[in-house]
Every structure is written in structure tokens, then in C-alpha cells.
Amino acid sequence: MTERDRTDQHVARWLPVLPDLDPDVEGAVTRMSLLSRHLREVKERALAELDLQEKEYGTLHALAGRGGRAAPSEIAGDLRMAPASITARVDALVHRGFVRRIPSTADRRRIDVELTDAGRDAWRRAMGVVGDEEHRVLGALSPDERRLLSDLLRRVALVAERSPSPARNVGGPV
């Protein structure tokens, strides 16, 4: 028999109340939500211990993903923010010594933002804590199972990324 978790208790409690509840859908969605919450809490603790704010980490992460150097507009695009919103973030990171502004090699009129060694180290330390926990949790699965899970979640994510269907039972029980 498979070991039971809190979600099994949650589903068992709601089935008599909502007889049309699909236990597999409810179980999958609840478990994804719990896992997401757990990883977010690990990340928040790691950032607090490293004295990094979420927005600082996000900006460092966006820069690292672009090879350590990018235009503010590129960072803004990666973070889905207005370009003007990036200035204050970059100012704070410059003040902490995590990034520096440098002339663009592509356009003399532009200034790029570049990770410093301190910024890269802060980003890597935070990534390490979060990555270690992701590997610990998903270590419950074999490599083939992890690949299957990733493939299945991709299929679900592709549906979620499309326009949502109209709400059903609006105003009815939740």
C-alpha cells in the first residue's frame, strides 16, 4: 500500500461534502500547491539568512541568466516589469556592491548592468540552498520518474498557459 499524506486526509474529508470531486485532480493540485509553498518558504528562509530581498535575488537571477550582463530594459522584460521600475533595484544592488553600471558594447548611448563577483556569489549561495532542497524533495523519484513528472507537468502547464476557459458555476460553492 502507498503511504498516505495530509492530502489524502484532505481529499477524504471533502469527498462526502463534494461527491463530484475528482480525488486525483484534487490530490494533484493540492500536492503541487503544497510543494510550491514549501519551496517558496525554503527560498524565503535562505534569502533572509543571506540578507537578500526577493526583488534583489530576482534581479541577480535575471542578470545571471543573461550571462551576468544586460541592459536594464532586458532585465525588466525578464522580470515582466516596466523598465523604469528597474532603476531603483539596480541602484540598491550597486550600493551593495552586487552589480555595476558599465557602458554598453552594443550602443554607446546605453548603460548595461553587470554582476560583480559579490553579486554572483550571493546569487549562487541562494540558488544552492534552493537547489539542494529541490533535489532532496525530488530525490524521492528515480531519474526516469523525474523525467516523466516533468513531461506530465509540461502538458498541464501548456494547457494553463492558454487562455482560461470561462468560469463554471460562478457564485456556486467553492
Image (spheres, helix red, strand yellow):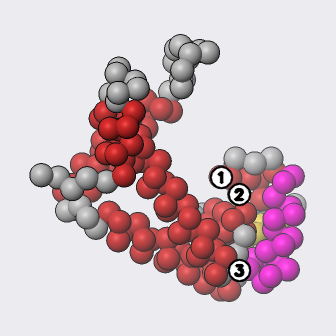
User: Please, which residue is most extreme toward the left here?
Assistant: 1
The segment highlighted magenta reads 84-106
- Res. 92 image quadrant: bottom right
Amino acid type, residue under disc 1 in the picture = Asp
The quarter of the image holding the C terminus is top right
The answer to which of marks 3 and 1 sits earlier in the sequence is: 3
Residue name at image x 81 percent, y 65 percent = 89
- Which residue position holds label 2? 75
Which circle, 3 or 2, is nearer the viewer?
3
> Who is closer to the viewer here, 72 or 154?
154
What's the mark number on residue 51? Answer: 3
Check contact, mark 1 vs mark 2: CB within 8 A: yes
Give the Cα distance between marks 3 and 1.
23 Å
Q: Secondary structure at mark 2?
A: helix
Q: Position of residue 25 (x, y in %)?
A: 35, 33
Whether 58 is drawn above or below 46: the answer is above
Q: Is residue 112 left or right of residue 163?
A: right
